[in-house]
Amino acid sequence: MNICIIGAGYVGLATGISFCIKGHRVEFYDSDRNKILILNDGRVPFYEKGMEEALQKCIKRGSAIFTDNLKKALKEAAVIFICVNAPTLPRGKTDLTSIKSLFSKLNKLIKRKVTIAIKTTINPDDYLEVKKLLKNENFHLAVNPEFLREGSALKDSLNPFRIVIGTYDESSKKDLENLYSNFDSPKIITDPLSAIMIKYASNSFLAVKISFINEIANLCDKIGANIDDVATGIGLDPRIGKDFLKAGIGFGGSCLPKDTRNLISFSKRAKANISIAEKVYEINDVQFLAAIDKLKEVLGNLKGKTIAVLGLAFKGGTDDLRDSVSLKIINYLKKHGVIVRAHDYMIYEKAGKLLKDVFISGDIYSVAEGCDALIIATDWQEYKRIDWAKIKNLTTGNLIIDGRNILNKKLLIKLGFIYSGIGRS
Ligand code: UDX
């Protein structure tokens, strides 16, 4: 099938490349000429495991084509996927500027029958607004949300837990069923608004799970219980499930915080009350203070102390800083007179431009030098394998706050560190 992906960002690329791998021909359109040049050159403008190799194979086979010419990109397409960025405005409405301008171009450029599938996450009321803009009766509209995780985006696009197709329209339903026929995943065919709700409710539910386990971990700290055993114990009940029960300093990223925020705001506009989402948002907003309180317990006043924040990305395996809890911690520490040093495996250069007055490096040993304490802020699995004895010799103090509960507590205590995880007392 001939597919056109509009918006060659994270979602667009993962989606499009997975269709190429499944045997389709995909034209990617993006208005950012520079991005198109990079992609045509076989490079991916962000880090995602396996994506660049897959992209190069698809280009070589001729199944992935990149262009900044929309007319050309649309020419052969039977299905068009809308994967453009739609940021949230201050009051929780979606910023529809790019979608609106895109839809007016589609109205002018396409005269034949085509399926248009919206992957971009937009609020239900925003969907009803943009739907009216597609004036051509040959357009067959559907909502087809994505659920991919950064760090495993390609794997998730090729083997999604489910494929959701939301449409009232037989023609787009048939096209999308056809397109996904060689994907071995359960398929849910529903109406567009229910498809949108599946997306928002899924991400918000994941956020509920994380905030729940974080509050349980905070309680474990107070009473002297161990969150690792508690999470294992409750996760073994299949009605609960073991995933998304990793306690820590809170969730970040481009989706969970935004989707929870948007669910709150459009539910208010719909005169409904999703108070659990509001609570989750409040809990997550302050969960990073669990790490700060632990620092204060041992160091007292933080002013003038030197603290290393290990990890800047919102989670390990990505180079994405969006809504990263690490940034919240760094800003808090700087505001309270702390000398901050920071490490990341991926985004030390990009972060260096953003965080003035912070020594940032990709070399963890130089970051640890002279520090009174270290905080693990990102769950980079590599932190488990570094030479902690060497770090001990480099630091001035001996305190480690493990904000992601990934380190071996016994080993670190044996090396002479004071170790404190979240709920691992
Ligand atoms: C998420 C959803 O998982 C995905 O389905 C959706 O389409 C996009 O948003 P992503 O943002 O890539 O994916 O990351 P995810 O793995 O969900 O983690 C989000 C945040 O939660 C990270 O900050 C992570 O560190 C945190 N997290 C996750 C926890 O604190 N504990 C957990 O148990 C799991």
Image: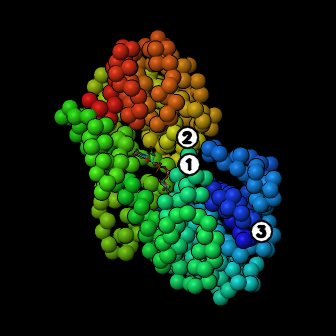
For label 1, the residue is 152
Mark 1 and mark 2 lie on one chain; the one further toward the N terminus is 1
Residue 33 visible in image: no
Measuring 49% from the left and 42% from the top, which residue is drawn there?
315
Mark number for residue 317? 2
Compared to residue 69, the image places residue 380 above or below, namely above
Q: Which amino acid does label 2 sit on?
A: Gly
Q: Is residue 50 left or right of residue 312?
A: right
The residue wearing badge 3 is 73
Is label 2 in a helix, a strand or a loop? loop
Side (left or right) of 76 relative to 332: right
Q: Do the residues labelled 1 and 3 touch (CB within 8 Å)?
A: no
Q: Which of marks 1 and 2 is in front?
A: 1
The quadrant the C terminus occupies is top left
Residue 261 in the image, given as x and y percentages of width and height: 41, 59
Q: Specify which label sits upstream in the sequence, 1 or 3.
A: 3
State the residue in front, 234 or 286. 234
Amino acid at circle 1: Ser
Kindly identify the residue that appears in the image at 58 percent across and 41 percent down. 319
Q: Do the CB atoms of the residues marked 1 and 2 lie less than 8 Å apart?
A: yes
Residue 75 x, y percent position in the rendering = 79, 74
Q: Mark 1 and mark 2: span between their CA atoms?
A: 9 Å
Which mark is on residue 318? none
- Whichever of labels 2 and 3 marks the residue nearer the N terminus, that label is 3
Residue 235 against residue 33 in the figure, above or below: above
Please, is residue 108 above or below residue 84 in the view?
Answer: below
Q: How crowded is mark 1: few (under 14 residues within 10 Å), some or many (20 or more)?
A: some
Residue 100 place in picture, x, y as percent: 62, 73
Q: Nearer the viewer, mark 1 or mark 3?
A: 1
